[in-house]
Amino acid sequence: MNTFVPLLIVTASIGLISGSVIWIVGKLRLGLEVDGFGSAFIAGIVIAFVAGIISFILGIAGVMDGGGLIGGIVHLIISAMVLMISDRFLSGLKVAGFVGALLASISIGAVYWLGGLLLGQII
């Protein structure tokens, strides 16, 4: 029970941040359309969960170490694939094929990067 509440808080936080980023990219129409923030929030949690599991498995298999250019490319491809899979299971999320998913994944990464820069300036 001690670890359950912090896990819920972290999951909700990741969902809010990821959902916001997915919602922003959806509004920009860069290969991704989202019906509303609720769908973006659910997509953010699903994408973070699945991408985390895939990255963990690839790390154990020795395929990637999580850093560098290769790690970045692998994360982009994983994110694009997860977006395409999420499109099939989440009714409020529409992805325009693999190219659209890759473009959305790059856009999501760019929004995260810009957010990190802005937060770095504030903090």
Image: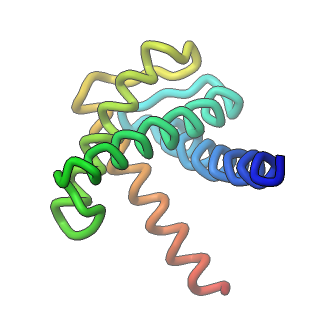
Q: Is residue 115 above or below residue 24?
A: below
- Residue 115, image x and y in percent? 54, 67
Image quadrant occupied by the C terminus: bottom right
Q: Is residue 107 left or right of residue 63?
A: right
Location of residue 73 by image quarter: bottom left
Q: Is residue 120 above or below residue 44?
A: below
Q: Is residue 100 left or right of residue 112?
A: left
- Residue 46, image x and y in percent? 54, 32
Which residue is drawn at the image coordinates 28% and 53% (left, top)?
Answer: 59
Q: Is residue 12 above or below residue 82?
A: below
Colour approach in the figure: rainbow
- Residues 108 and 71: in front is 71
Which residue is drawn at the image coordinates 58% and 47% (left, top)?
Answer: 18
- Residue 80, image x and y in percent? 31, 36
- Residues 32 and 62: in front is 62
Q: Is residue 78 above or below residue 31?
A: below
Which residue is drawn at the image coordinates 58% and 19% (left, top)?
Answer: 92
The mark tally for this picture is 0
- Residue 8, image x and y in percent? 75, 45
Q: Residue furthest front?
A: 1
Which residue is drawn at the image coordinates 35% and 44% (left, top)?
Answer: 105
Q: Is residue 18 left or right of residue 84?
A: right
